[in-house]
Image (cartoon, coloured by chain):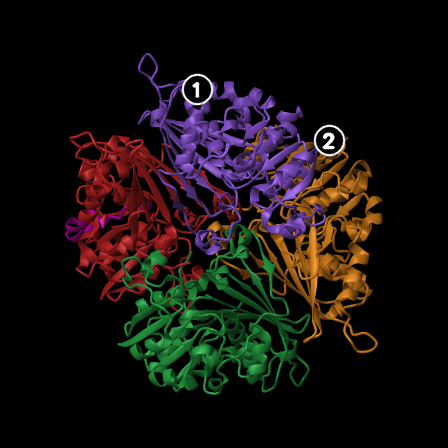
Chain colours: A red, B green, C orange, D purple
Amino acid sequence: MIKAGIIGATGYAGNELVRILTGHKEVEIKWYGSRSYIDKKYAQVYQNMFEIVEDCCLDDNIEALAEQVDVIFTATPQGFLAGLLTEEILKKTKVVDLSADYRIKDVAVYEAWYGIEHKSPQFLGEAVYGLCEVNREKIKAARLIANPGCYTTCSILTAYPLVKEGLIDPETLIIDAKSGTSGAGRGAKLPNLYCEVNENIKAYGVASHRHTPEIEEQLGYAAGTEITINFTPHLVPMNRGILATEYAALVKKADGSLPTYEEVKAVYDAYYQKEKFVRVLEKDVLPETKWVEGSNYVDINFKIDPRTGRIIMMGALDNLVKGAAGQAVQNMNLLFGFPEWEGLELVPLFP
Amino acid sequence: MIKAGIIGATGYAGNELVRILTGHKEVEIKWYGSRSYIDKKYAQVYQNMFEIVEDCCLDDNIEALAEQVDVIFTATPQGFLAGLLTEEILKKTKVVDLSADYRIKDVAVYEAWYGIEHKSPQFLGEAVYGLCEVNREKIKAARLIANPGCYTTCSILTAYPLVKEGLIDPETLIIDAKSGTSGAGRGAKLPNLYCEVNENIKAYGVASHRHTPEIEEQLGYAAGTEITINFTPHLVPMNRGILATEYAALVKKADGSLPTYEEVKAVYDAYYQKEKFVRVLEKDVLPETKWVEGSNYVDINFKIDPRTGRIIMMGALDNLVKGAAGQAVQNMNLLFGFPEWEGLELVPLFP
Amino acid sequence: MIKAGIIGATGYAGNELVRILTGHKEVEIKWYGSRSYIDKKYAQVYQNMFEIVEDCCLDDNIEALAEQVDVIFTATPQGFLAGLLTEEILKKTKVVDLSADYRIKDVAVYEAWYGIEHKSPQFLGEAVYGLCEVNREKIKAARLIANPGCYTTCSILTAYPLVKEGLIDPETLIIDAKSGTSGAGRGAKLPNLYCEVNENIKAYGVASHRHTPEIEEQLGYAAGTEITINFTPHLVPMNRGILATEYAALVKKADGSLPTYEEVKAVYDAYYQKEKFVRVLEKDVLPETKWVEGSNYVDINFKIDPRTGRIIMMGALDNLVKGAAGQAVQNMNLLFGFPEWEGLELVPLFP
Amino acid sequence: MIKAGIIGATGYAGNELVRILTGHKEVEIKWYGSRSYIDKKYAQVYQNMFEIVEDCCLDDNIEALAEQVDVIFTATPQGFLAGLLTEEILKKTKVVDLSADYRIKDVAVYEAWYGIEHKSPQFLGEAVYGLCEVNREKIKAARLIANPGCYTTCSILTAYPLVKEGLIDPETLIIDAKSGTSGAGRGAKLPNLYCEVNENIKAYGVASHRHTPEIEEQLGYAAGTEITINFTPHLVPMNRGILATEYAALVKKADGSLPTYEEVKAVYDAYYQKEKFVRVLEKDVLPETKWVEGSNYVDINFKIDPRTGRIIMMGALDNLVKGAAGQAVQNMNLLFGFPEWEGLELVPLFP
């Protein structure tokens, strides 16, 4: 039994961490950190936890916390952890950071897209990008995990095998992503009001969303070269779920023909057949966010369009689980040698 | 490890049974019965179960099934089980019936409200009404459980202690209930289309809904006399959840004053403080369906209106869990001597 | 062509006033008052008005405004108008107040329920409660209209004929009301966030909602005596619409029997058959909020329950139209002698 | 005053035609055709029309109808009109067809994508594609209008000026479209049930949706050459609205640089500044479906991504108005010489 602390426990991702860890046999939560609700009972902030969590919220004193726990989850605004993290802390405890602070290796890129100075670039080198299916072995040995973003997890896993194996031209990649509203957080902002989101769909952050360089960096590793893509997020009137629809030109085979369904499927299977949390669907079954809600699954499928020579790849996940808290726990499991699926055998809720 | 069969496994309640039993340590599902989808893979009917359930759907041959399993769940239309149940079956297996066939002891009342003939009234006597918090001991000894309706579970538990202890006048009871749309089932009917339900609220079955006599019978037992109430269900644009708002005149104390908040609260606590799945909320915290979604909890609270001398009681549950499949599993746990909460430690999903 | 000014034009009710007045042949909006958005283009606050409204928002200087327009609509917080209104203003212009400041004749009741001091009780006497179907003639002669609340319009009109004609016992009246979320306004508050409202239903303001005394006062006039009722509002995950479900004991006839359907229907028809905006539905057709969305209609029907001797009355309207802006325009039409339906022949939008 | 008949009046598009024509000064509806509801009062099928429409539904005898009306709207399944249309009918009345029967000039393409035989190809030559902003003059002189599809109207208008003026390479065009559920019609089908659509998003008809060839044909005319594109529709949990997000490579200028924002904006303005129903939004204001709900507007904007050299164009409309019934009325106005916006000055409903 290890001890865990959460900084930022009263955001939606923090609450999802609490939900998942509550059902995890090997972990005990010792610290519900929340700047806004210090000394308030956690279950009064999240009434779903009534009679399940009895603790009160504490502050976000990460140094004090590091003394007490084996792992710290930070579900905090950009720049928070980078401003506080020290070698002392990392010597005492593992850190799984759900913010973007250590996801991007190039400080200049981080600072350009996030518009803030990075306060602890010295840890960028050792931080491991916690996309479990891609970096499993590195994660096991890490102290500091940069837990991937919700859009990025979905976007990368959907295209990864085809980029890695050279079946698609990564420079043609266009990712059109759709997200539920919990991704916008629990801040009381006008655009997130019920009446503004309901019965509405819009794009936002067009050509400027911060998850773009994160996708480019990771898929660039897979491609073996720097790549530039288009990524467009949309806000959808639903609580949870991300669907990424991805377009790319297929690379023709030597004889000038396109790869077949079977050939593409074989590549996906080679990468994902043994992955518990990635489900490559049967032919012609398209991913829907509802089928993964509440679970750690990513559902993936694709369709080849012989008319245009493009492939349309689709991936769906729950942004709060595989896109945030679930993946964070999956990373924790790897860090501590627990079964990777411990606490994560969550059956999707339908309807 | 016991073996279970489900008849009607492809309705929403059936799917919820599969979700819950999949996480239950002591049960293995051996039979996914579905008249509509025989021989089709269950996971093709409910894609959330992809790579979780590998079995195909079978027919609804309850006699064959009784040979193979320890417990049968019937999530079937009214009259189905009553038409098939035999002493032979009950000698071989326990039955938890999610339909209304054995909920009402008086055949004439059943036939009047349901408009069908009851084909096996001989089992009405032994059938136990499976409201666990009320009939726990009887359930343990039963062969046949009449699993309560969704509206009724919520309506009864919300008012039960006050009726039982005589704090309210049951003849003044008015129940105004609101339900998500999964309660209407998965049948392809025009009134259940997205565009008909969305952005809309309506009452239905006013003064004629079939759950009325079920509530009256059970609360009548508590009151020690026959009672007649008003029950009005409403359809709400959400997937899951029932909220019951219940109004009744408080019985004045000997000195002519109304019971106080503390006195009423003490009665609720006496009945529910030890009940894992009933949460009486803190003062002034009102039940919301979202706080129990996906879980087996019922959240209850009340408010006294000194101006009118009435009490307003409110209860919220997830109609597919505590209102159907969760309670069925709770009943099964009692029948087989498992811990009552086995498989049911489901933390509510928020948001 | 008259000139109108709106103070509070950037709330949801204000925007609905703009929508309706834009289609009104006899009115020109001269003043879009908004404390929060002074000098900002109105169409940048409400993008639906792009290329329809070219004006910028102005401040809320009601004295300056009174010089320029024939009618002022105030869609402002409680207490705002009461703090500013003067005889000077009322000599220059008519005022239709969408707040509660002049709805309740008894200052003590107002101050008790609203928790603020009333700054201009001298106008309470002349203010006319603008429920057009009830107070039509008084409205025509008024200078100051207290436009009714959304819940109250629905609640009162649904029960009014039966209270007035003595068919129900008003002391037994229980109103269980359900509202879409636009009624909560456009303020950026956590409980109104999409993820908090969506997939959720809850009661609020139980036994304490401010519309209670307003309903009691108006139905008390109809009953010819003071009455006390229960009123419980609920928040429903939809943008627009209020459904009121109302319960009351029918008064038995001299022979001890209950009034029949036909007798009750005849009373409703006597009051509403000539009312353009009140639709008493055909037998067994129950009101649904979706059928009146975007329109000025109230749909009403009822069901007698012979088992309990109660009647269940139901009414549905669009809270922003008949519950706010539409009724305000209806009042304006009466004030200025325009056809009562001018600008209000809005066909409900479905789906 | 002209007379109109609607065949298919009880589908969602038919009901929207009724809503719009009810407010049109120059038209009287004489025939509410509906195979499913013959002799039933129209207002019993669409309760929003209670006390507005008194007529009953009639059959779909187009020959009888042609004798009585000046214009027939057909909101019918594919192949219906093509199987019935005759020269006799067209001599007596104008026809605005909301189905796809006469949208595609090449019979082979129609038959390949729709999988049915075209029964009256002789009218394909004279049928005018009723995209008013593009084909206004031809429409005025036509007898038979092929009213464009909902996705196609949005997709074409969003890209049209840039394709026409050669600013983008049409072969790189990728259209990722999102639609509310009313586009799926009022048929009682399982995938359209509330619980299947709500809290869910999915792609469908990937690389095979029937609106693809329609877009290709029309944008091909603009490009002056045949083009092939990707079009992917998605189902969004909302009643109304289509958002098209369109990606294309910008054509570099002679000096190798990309067109600027101002240059692209100038092209859009040249085409749309005088168009009442096309609103090119201000810089950085992105289209949202909610801002056009209930209206005949298309809101359009774009963003240049200098990193990839692509432009992202976005368009939003209400699928039942500009995407169906509104555009049909706009066509009718052109056919009969009415002001183009008569009956269509519908202010978007918000929220």
Q: Quadrant of residue C204?
A: bottom right
- Taking the view exactly as shown, the residue that stands out farthest to the top is D254
Q: What's drawn in magenta, residue-wise?
A: A132-150
**Would you place residue A102 above or below residue B180 in this image?**
above
Per the image, the residue denoted by label 1 is D164
Residue A14: horizontal and vertical position, in percent? 35, 55
Q: State the quadrant of the N terminus of chain D.
A: top right
In the image, taking residue C261 as reference, residue A274 lies left or right, namely left
Q: Is residue C108 above or below residue A98?
A: below
Please check whether the numbered discs 2 and 1 fall on a single chain: yes
Residue to which mark 2 is pinned? D1
| Chain under callout 1 | D
Horizontal and vertical percent for residue D115? 41, 39
Residue in view at x 33 percent, y 64 percent: B57
Q: Secondary structure at mark 2?
A: loop
Q: Residue at x 58, y 80 (%)?
A: B109
Q: Chain of mark 2?
A: D
Query: For the residues marked 2 and 1, what is the alpha-carbon distance in whole angstroms?
Result: 38 Å
Q: Quadrant of residue A16?
A: bottom left
